[in-house]
Amino acid sequence: MARDHGFHPIRVKRVIQETADTRTYVLDTAFDYEAGQFMTFKVCGTLRSYSMSSSPTTDTEVMTTVKRVPGGLVSNWMHDHLSPGDLVEATLPAGVFCLRENGAPLVAFCGGSGVTPVLSLVKTALATTDRRVRLLTADRDADAVIFGPVLDGLAERYPGRFELRRHLDTDGGFLTEPQIREFAGNAPGTDFYVCGPDPFMDLVERVLLDGGTDPSQILIERFGLPAAEPAEQPAEAEGTITIVLGGKKHTVPQHSGETLLQSARRAGLSPPFSCEAGNCATCIAQVTEGAARMQINNALEDDEIADGWVLTCQGEPTTPDITVVYED
């Protein structure tokens, strides 16, 4: 049986104004979570995933931090309408952007609100391990810095283990490749954590890889927008895909390179989904006949996969015929 990936009503206890466009929501919940994980919120009929900024080992309350996005339906609604005492629907915590139990040095790069899960990781690593932690934050200007006093406090508390470096675009332009290489250093076995806007993450990842970092040492948190549908109709392949949604069965021919979620849409169905990046498990379903391979999986655990559960946004059939059942 899969973990509970459904939605639960959660009450907001407090709202903290971090910057002019960033708020932290303190949630009245006792859900267990790991540093670096996120929750998926259902707001205005839309799903968005937001990371916890709190640490499960150093904070007594669960907190998630949301930056207002220009034109963003969910972030704007939360900022304009969500107040203490209100209920919001959210999933249990999920995600694999978590601390590894290898004791390796931790080097993190975060841009803007990408500091949210990184703060959780940094607080937890400093409090529960003896590993060295280094963090580079990149922000537009001083007013855009999120969690500035908290990070300064950690730097003062752990002067021998925690190095904090800030980069402001207004002072020196955008972060450059040489600056990334210099901060990354050449310590073997380092775990690199990267979170922020896509161009920022792409740049950091490319510099690390070009410098010889093993891809397995780079952990990146991406909450991508839904993938665009193919411009051209994929070629039909041998076999069928049977989708069971709401207790009703629908069968369509397989199309090469098409995910199970895309096949369900082609059948005229509207199954649940959110990130379409393999992160949130909102699109989870169970393969009861046949098999599928996931391109990306940042949400399901090994025992769930063994039981046939699949992220339909990432799953492609590997057998001629397959049956996928969504939970009621």
Image (cartoon, helix red, strand yellow):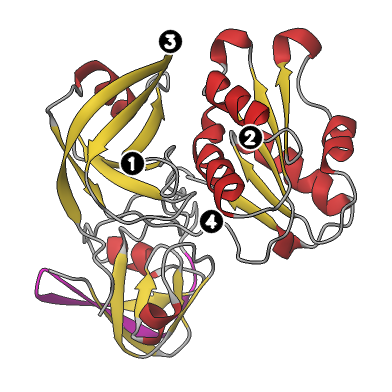
Task: Measure how far apart labels 4 and 2 are at the Cα level.
Answer: 15 Å
Dot 2 falls on a residue whose secondary structure is strand
Amino acid at dot 4: Cys
Percent position of residue 187, x then y: 87, 53
Task: Measure how far apart labels 2 and 1 are at the Cα level.
Answer: 25 Å
Dot 3 falls on a residue whose secondary structure is loop
Q: Which residues are magenta?
A: 234-251
| Label 3 neighbour load within 10 Å: few <14, some 14-19, many 20+ | few
| Residue 238 counted in the magenta span | yes
Percent position of residue 120, x then y: 50, 42
Dot placed on the residue nearer the N-terminal end, 4 or 3? 3
Amino acid at dot 2: Cys
Q: Residue at x 46, y 59 (%)?
A: 278
Dot placed on the residue nearer the N-terminal end, 2 or 1? 1
The residue at which mark 2 appears reads as 110
As drawn, 127 above or below 174: below
Amino acid at dot 1: Thr
Seen from this angle, which residue lies furthest left? 247
The residue at which mark 1 appears reads as 60
As drawn, 223 above or below 303: above
Dot placed on the residue nearer the N-terminal end, 3 or 2? 3
Seen from the viewer's position, the closer of residues 195 and 199 is 195
Q: Residue at x 49, y 62 (%)?
A: 298
Task: Measure how far apart labels 4 and 1 are at the Cα level.
Answer: 19 Å
| Label 4 neighbour load within 10 Å: few <14, some 14-19, many 20+ | some
Percent position of residue 158, x then y: 67, 36
The C terminus: image quadrant: bottom left
